[in-house]
Image: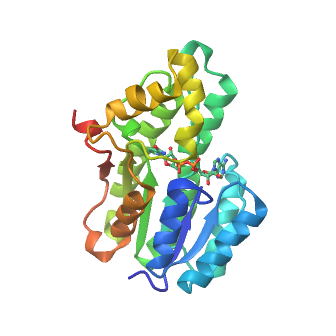
Amino acid sequence: MLKGKSALVTGSTSGIGLAIARALAAAGANLTINGFGDKAAIENERAGLEKEFGVKALYSPADMSKPAEIAAMIRGAEQAFGALDILVNNAGIQHVAPIEEFPIEKWDQMIAINLCAAFHTIRTAVPGMKARKWGRIVNTASAHSLVASPFKSAYVTAKHGLAGLTKTVALEVATFGITANCISPGYVWTALVEKQIPDTMKARGLTAEQVKRDVLLAAQPTKEFVTVDEVAALAVYLCSDAAKSITGANLSIDGGWTAA
Ligand code: NAD
């Protein structure tokens, strides 16, 4: 379905981004993967994509809080594959703390990675997409792009901003065969969720089990975590020609959370 297309997924060394990269490769796209982690594990992932799916895969270590590295990563993908057709802004971090205790440097870092990075990737990638009259921009937002939870001020702010950026870009590129959409998952069991459990225990005075049941899954009517593969399948669908009229949308995949 995506044979010959070139895709880039930020934050694709674990969790949702890794699943999206694998699903795009399974659909035939050449990949640029990005994110932090163990060097050997990342090389395993890159080589595995090539071997398993018969595509070409590159790795960029660009830090999504650094605009110059982001622009260089996009240019690198364009040069390596002759184009960048599919851009998935997925890298993200979380920090949980009451507003008056929220570390200033954490706030700045989260706004940079979870929001500003998408501005930098999109502004660099759009001219090429416009010239070729085809493009897909998929932004991993969150249920927190639609609703808030206490102690997540930077995350909720960044994700609401990402939803606004997505809508604005969708309008600007609508006549160029380019779509821009958000996917907004509820709680998906990944490292990002696992790591926020200790801080949530501290902020709310709960045990780990209570955090899972009474904070995380309390919001999700299905009482189940969303899986990374479910999110990846939606991303691949948005990249298909069948989805060419879906743009500017914020698609919830949250077990009913934001219906409440
Ligand atoms: P994860 O921690 O498993 O993956 C995060 C990825 O981002 C990793 O590859 C990491 O190396 C990368 N990353 C972090 N900082 C980076 C930086 N400065 N530069 C480049 N890469 C960086 O987390 P995940 O749950 O898979 O999260 C992926 C996205 O999904 C995030 O944007 C997150 O906000 C969003 N999301 C997650 C959930 C959830 O419940 N897990 C729910 C809604 C939205």
Residue 243: x, y in percent?
Answer: 28, 69
Based on the displayed image, in which of its 4 quarters is residue 247 positioned?
bottom left
Quarter in which the N terminus is drawn = bottom left
- Report how many numbered discs are placed on residues in the image: 0
Q: Which residue is most to the left?
A: 259
User: Which residue occupies the foreground of this view, 123 or 233?
Assistant: 233
Residue 36 in sight in this render: yes
Q: Which residue: 66% across, 73% down?
A: 46
- Does residue 206 appear to the left or right of 142 in the view shown? right
Q: How is the image coloured?
A: rainbow
In the image, is residue 206 above or below residue 112? above
Foreground residue among 233 and 110: 233
Residue at horizontal 66 percent and vertical 23 percent from the top: 104
Residue lying at 40% horizontally and 75% vertically, measured from the top left: 134
Work out whether residue 178 can be spotted. no
Q: Position of residue 71 (x, y in %)?
A: 66, 60
Q: Position of residue 200 (x, y in %)?
A: 53, 24
Query: Residue at coordinates 34% horizontally, 74% vertically from top-left?
Result: 240
Residue 11 rendering spot, x and y as whole percentages: 59, 55
Q: Is residue 189 left or right of residue 255?
A: right
Asked which quadrant contains residue 121, the reply is: bottom right
Q: Looking at the rendering, in which quadrant would you find the C terminus?
A: top left
Residue nearest the observer in this picture, 108 or 132: 108
